[in-house]
């Protein structure tokens, strides 16, 4: 709980990684 408040950027990085993985997955499919 405290880690989330101290490192809000961490959640943003995880969200970016999710988007990047999604893009990479779609690119690999084609």
Image: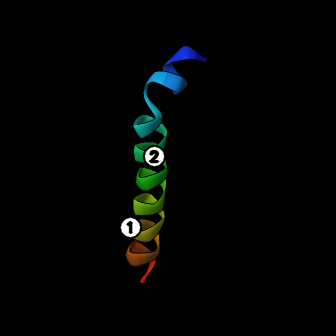
Give the crowd class for mark 2: few <14, some 14-19, many >=20 residues within 10 Å.
few
Residue lying at 53% horizontally and 26% vertically, measured from the top left: 4
Which corner quadrant holds the C terminus?
A: bottom left
Q: Which of the image's four quarters has the N terminus? A: top right
Per the rendering, the mark at residue 7 is none
Secondary element at tag 2: helix
In the rendered image, which residue does mark 1 sit on?
A: 24
* Local crowd size for mark 1, using a 10 Å CA cut-off: few (<14), some (14–19), many (≥20): few
Decide which of 5, 17 is in the foreground and name it: 5
Q: 3 above or below 13?
A: above
Q: Is residue 15 above or below residue 4?
A: below
Q: Position of residue 20 (x, y in %)?
A: 40, 61
In terms of image quadrants, where is residue 13? top left
The number of numbered badges drawn on the structure is 2
Q: Where residue 5 appears, x then y in whole percent?
A: 53, 25
Q: Which label lies toward us, 1 or 2?
A: 2
Where residue 29 sits, quadrant-wise, is bottom left
Note whether 20 is above or below 29 in the view shown: above
* Mark-to-mark CA distance, 1 and 2: 18 Å
- Residue in the picture at 38% in, 67% down: 24
Q: Earlier in the sequence, mark 1 or mark 2?
A: 2
Residue at the (39%, 77%) spot, across then down: 27
For residue 26, above or below residue 2: below
- For residue 12, the mark is 2
Q: Residue at x 43, y 28 (%)?
A: 7
């Amino acid at each position: 709980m405290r880690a989330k408040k101290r490192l809000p950027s961490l959640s943003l990085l995880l969200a970016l990684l999710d988007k990047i993985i999604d893009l990479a997955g779609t690119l690999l499919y084609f």
